[in-house]
Image (tube, rainbow, N blue to C red):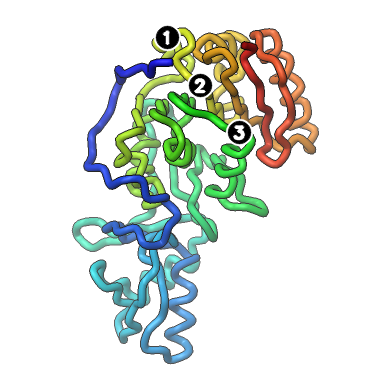
Amino acid sequence: MNCVTWTISTIPRPHGGKTSVNEKNVQNTYFIMSYVQARPLLQARAQGQAFATGSPDLGRTWMEAEITSRGALFPGRGLVEWEELLRFEKKENSCFDRDEEGAWTAVKTFSEETGRSYSLYPTAGAPTMLVSGVPMHRIKGTDPWKDTQEKMKALGAFHGCVLDTATGLGYTAILASEKAQTVHTVELDPAAVSIARRNPWSEELFSRPGIERHLGDSAEVVHRFGNGAFSAVIHDPPEPGLGGDLYSLEFYRELFRVLGRGGRLFHYVGNPESPSGARMTRGVVRRLSEAGFGKIVPAPRAFGVTAVKPG
């Protein structure tokens, strides 16, 4: 099967190979922190330590920071003052990065196009993105990176070209690109892309040559792909209140069309043990079946279902 080769909208950036985003030896120039990174440094100061192991990029890389009278000094990044670290500690819902003038600001924005607010939300692992206050990954009992890994495990083996219907922070596209020839990932809102650009865990979304980024509504973009263009589809939409069309029978029929014979689909739905999640799962399964999919089975660890296009 040949991959589609066109793009709707891409912004080229220098690429940096196939290093996994969660490896701690990745080199980058981000200087972004949250309460998770602030507290160990404040504790080291309280204990009178001269140095402490810290992360200047939300836990993606680690290094020895010098504990000075003014703040914590990270080699190659600079100083973060104690006043700022104390502010980070109190703001558990925010991540802060330093601008060119040295000011620390929360990573958030508002989209004039969609009327939605976006912000980067810290966890003990990779951060998630809040869209109008709703987290885009599971964070209870897991973290966004592990959540994405569970979705990829549920999808199973794949090859060739993969469609990721909802880019977000790009974790799905990054993990899928480790196996796929090409990953085509679609994001509705430029504001979400601006948040991803400030997230060190999203760096490879913009650097890996095997990832093709598209800007637009997946319900419309999918019509531009050819029949059988993909060997797998990862459908991880926002909740119906934010992405209702992405749960429709019409959209499922388009996903069926762009999948090759024997192609696999993973569809995130939500907690199957909750009343709303169970109800939503029943509706999704029914519409997927009407669209032509077979072998529709629950993937409870990933909070979704998998399906196959009959061969």
- Quadrant including the N terminus: top left
Query: Residue at horizontal 52%, vertical 14%?
Result: 260
Residue drawn at 69 percent across, 8 percent down? 290
Q: Position of residue 120 (x, y in %)?
A: 44, 49
Give the mark nearest the N terminus, 2 or 1: 1
Is residue 45 shown above or below 104?
below
> Residue 18, how many percent across, how many down?
36, 45
Name the residue: 36% across, 35% down: 191
Q: Where residue 17 is drawn, which disc sits there?
A: none
Image side of residue 216 versus residue 230, left or right = left
Calculate the distance from the C-alpha at mark 3 to the C-alpha at mark 2: 11 Å
The residue beneath circle 2 is 231
Q: The C terminus lies in which quarter of the figure?
A: top right
Q: Please tell me whether mark 2 or mark 1 is closer to you in this view.
A: 2
User: Which residue is labeled 1 in the image?
Assistant: 226
Q: Which mark is residue 156?
A: 3
Residue 246 appears left or right of 301 = left
Determine whether, in the image, residue 252 is placed left or right of residue 90.
right
Which element carries disc 3, helix, strand or loop?
loop
> In the rendered view, would you say 6 is above or below 77?
above
Outermost residue, bottom side? 48
Q: Answer above or below: position of 72 versus 5.
A: below
Q: Amino acid at mark 3?
A: Gly
Which is nearer the eye, 60 or 293?
A: 293
